[in-house]
Image: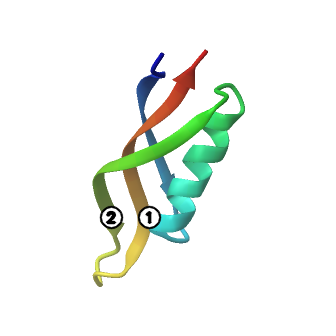
């Protein structure tokens, strides 16, 4: 018999980097969701200062996990 996965969509942010935003989001999801199998990045957005420097990374991603 095959497996079944469920997908949830989450938003997360970081002032450090895009990778940190993804890691932060996945760690937070893992506090309540078990059997995480992967994630897709849907949207990547940056917030900038007036000089164009990045002040915050914002990520929307879909996280899939195995349903048992």
Image disc number at residue 30: none
For residue 59, above or below residue 68: below
Q: Is residue 18 above or below residue 27?
A: below
Kindly give the residue lying farthest to the right in the view shown.
31
Q: Position of residue 26 (x, y in %)?
A: 58, 45
Q: Is residue 42 left or right of residue 38?
A: left
Residue 25 is situated, as x and y percent measured from the top left of the image, at 56, 46
Q: Find the distance from the CA under tag 1 to the CA under tag 2.
A: 6 Å
Task: State if disc 2 and disc 1 touch (CB < 8 Å).
Answer: yes
Label 1: element kind = strand
**Secondary structure of residue under mark 2:** strand
- Left or right of residue 20: residue 3: left
Residue 46 image label? 2
Q: Earlier in the sequence, mark 1 or mark 2?
A: 2
Q: Nearer the viewer, residue 43 or 51?
A: 43
- The quadrant in which residue 29 appears is top right
At a point 55% along the width and 26% down the height, the residue shown is: 66
- Residue 9 horizontal side relative to residue 21, left or right: left
Residue at 53 percent across and 30 percent down: it is 65
Q: Which residue is mark 1?
A: 56
Q: Residues within 10 Å of mark 2 (few under 14, many from 20)?
A: some
Q: Residue at x 29, y 77 (%)?
A: 50
Image color mode = rainbow
């Amino acid at each position: 018999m095959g497996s079944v996965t469920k997908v949830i969509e989450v938003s997360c942010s970081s002032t450090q980097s895009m990778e940190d935003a993804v890691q932060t989001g996945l760690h937070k999801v893992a506090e309540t969701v078990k059997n995480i199998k992967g994630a897709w990045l849907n949207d990547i957005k940056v917030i900038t200062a007036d000089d164009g420097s990045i002040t915050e990374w914002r990520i929307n991603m879909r996280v899939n996990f195995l349903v048992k």
